[in-house]
Amino acid sequence: MTHPLLDLPPLSAARFAAIEDRVARLLGTRQDVLITQGEALLPLEGAIRAAAGPGTVALNIVTGPYGQTFGDWLRDCGATVHDLAVPFHTAVTADQVREAFAAHPEIDFVSLVHAEAATGNTNPVAEIGETVRAQGALFYLDAVASVGAEPVLPDAWGVDLCVIGAQKAMGGPAGVSAVSVSERAWARMAANPRAPRRSYLSLLDWKERWLDAGRAALPHAPAQLEMLALEACVERIEAAGLETVMARHASAAAATRAGALALGGGLEPYVHESRDAAPVATTLRAPADADASELVAAALAAEPALPLAAGGGALAKEMIRVNHYGPDATPEVVRGALAALGAALAERGHPTDVAAAHRAVAETYADSGM
């Protein structure tokens, strides 16, 4: 008996290349785009290990947990690392980056997360990109959460290594990702004797065996289901229009923020300024006398399908995250999350006004024209 997910025809090199080309168009880039056969941590780590080594002097911008991870990888590569850490309730600024360059003019590599879904903030990449270009440094960007939810423009922003994944705003699976690579980045990798070779992490192997060979034959069997799912994600975004998809995420973020403020019960936005708030996830600070993880557990006990999570690690007791990305960037999800959190707070003696929260959500969507 045939099965639609198992009995598939082979994925050709031409089909694989065509999907890469569609991803490149989504990013508005003329850089090389490689689709990597794994979750986004694969190209995130592979790009750092390819481009950084003992001679690298890196500015690692930390606005959440992924920035901390990148610093660890850079140090493991032998790079000299200067961390620029800002509180997780805000975003980094181009002025702070310029100050770091003035203090360490030898910096030649910059790593940054665009949107930190884990902490709910987003960074002004366009302004930072101008500063990085003036410095002449290589610019590495994690746009895994932001792609599809806000503009991601590697060429316009001067990004040399831009990593994306399908699993958040694109609404797809976690098992496929991609990276755009500038000519400057390829040259840096080629000059790095520590760049991974004959390795699953090796971008240079893909370049030589796939791109330089004219994309005529795949180096290994592709992750077929994930590739087809990625193609479907891009098709869906193209059909709706990227601007429409981004507007849907922006409206969900604004409505969640407004609804949480109207709900009361001691909830407040974790990211202080709305301009610094990511469109993929809204983080909320739990009341001082409540445990965020317990509130989330109570809300999910009532509504298991809601995209709610407590903060990770040390943030588990104070942060609640509403993940309104991909198919969850809807008014129904926003209202459901606020209602469930309101009920969990009320059970613990924190008065809430779910009706007021729903009115705020409706008004925000009306104002946005969605």
Image (cartoon, rainbow, N blue to C red):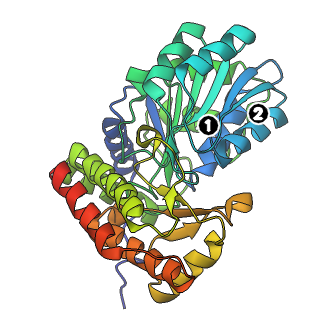
Side of 125 relative to 357 (left or right): right
Placement of 324 over or under 237, stated as above or below: below
Placement of 90 over or under 233, stated as above or below: above
**Mark number displayed over residue 203:** 1
Residue 46 at x, y = what percent? 66, 40
Instruction: Identify which residue, 181 or 266, lies in the foreground.
Output: 266
Residue 12 at x, y = what percent? 39, 53
Placement of 168 over or under 136, stated as above or below: below
Please name the amino acid that badge 1 sits on: Leu
Side of 92 relative to 49 (left or right): left
Quarter of the image where one finds residue 60: top right
Quarter of the image where one finds residue 189: top right
Residue 215 at x, y = what percent? 44, 38
Instruction: Identify which residue, 311 or 156, lies in the foreground.
Output: 311
Q: Residue at x 43, y 28 (%)?
A: 154
Q: Quadrant of the N terminus?
A: bottom left
Badge nearest the viewer, 2 or 1: 2
Q: Which residue is mark 2?
A: 74
Please name the amino acid that badge 2 sits on: Leu
- Crowd tier of the residue under label 1, counting other residues whose Cα lies within 10 Å: few below 14, some 14–19, many 20 or above: many
Alpha carbon of mark 2 to alpha carbon of mark 1: how far? 17 Å
